[in-house]
Structures are given as C-alpha cells and as structure tokens.
Amino acid sequence: MKTSTTIKTAIAVLFFQQTVFSQETKKEVISSEPKYTIENCVNHFELDKATKTKVGYQYWFADKNFTQENTLKMSIVEPGKSTHAPHHHPEEEFFYILEGSASFYLDGKTVVVGPNTSLYCPSNAEHGISNAGTTNLKYLVIKKDLR
C-alpha cells in the first residue's frame, strides 16, 4: 500500500510541476508577442521612412514581424517599370490600385486597370504588375504570411 501511495504522490507532484512549467512557458510565449498600442497600430505614410528600390520605392504599413500573419505594403513604380518579373509563391495576394495605370499579368493573360481597382492573385499563380502609364503607379499589396 505504501508503494502505491508513494507512486500516486510522485505522479501528482510531476503533474503539478508540469502544469506550473506549462503555464510559465505560455507566459513567456505571450510576453514575446508584440504589444499593440494606439501609437504603433496607426501608421501614417512618411516618404523618408520608405525603402528606395530600382523602380521607385516601397513603404511597409505592416509587416509579418508586427502583425500575426498579414502584411500591408505600398509600392510606387515609375512609368514603364515593374518591381520584378512575373513570378509565383505559395501566398495569395491582393493589390489595390491607388493612382496611375497598372498592367496586371495573371497566368498568361494581361489586363490594364486604373485607380480604385482591386486585383487578386491566388496561391501559386504566376503573376506580375507593372506601370502601364506615364505617371507613377501607386498601389497597395496585402499578403498573408504562411508561417
């Protein structure tokens, strides 16, 4: 009987220790997540904080290091240029045209669109976007991270 009680006590102690350790681990994980405040959740575009590219510049309103799974970026592309050649990736993307004229390529077909137009690119579809106009093209890119 004494052995049975000792084993039950040992199991209870181990269970208690595991529960405490699990709660401490959860606290550590939670504390490593970003703290969201009104100051860091409102992001106003500032040109001096934008990243210069070969064809214009990009500005990240939110990146995957800040959000839990989404990114929001604004791209500005000079006339006749594109940020990169048609490509594909596992993430789906939305583009929203703010200003200018965009040539959108999706799986072998191309369409030219203007402001206030959204474009959707499904996962793994070959796609590209370029400036089809004579003024800068400004658009938003929304992508979900596949962590």
Image (cartoon, helix red, strand yellow):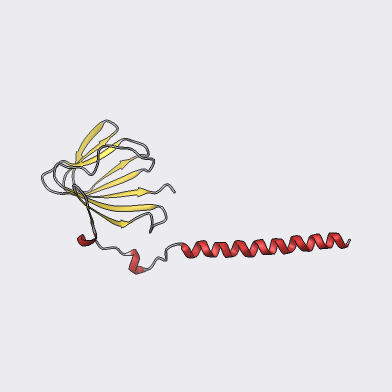
Q: Position of residue 53 (x, y in %)?
A: 21, 50
Number of marks in the rendered image? 0
Residue sitting at x 29%, y 63%: 43
Task: Tell me where residue 80 sits by quadrant.
Answer: top left
Q: Where residue 44 sits: x, y (%)?
A: 26, 63
Q: Nearer the viewer, residue 123 or 85?
A: 85
Q: Residue at x 25, y 32 (%)?
A: 109
Q: Is residue 41 left or right of residue 50?
A: right
User: In x, y percent, where is residue 49?
Assistant: 24, 61
- Is 120 rendered above or below residue 2? above
Q: Residue furthest right?
A: 1
Q: Nearer the viewer, residue 141 or 96?
A: 141
Q: Residue at x 78, y 63 (%)?
A: 9
Residue extending farthest to the top is 108
Instruction: Find residue 121 and report its horizontal and vertical position in percent.
Output: 32, 40
Could you say which quadrant of the image residue 7 lies in?
Answer: bottom right
Q: Identify the image quadrant of the N terminus.
A: bottom right
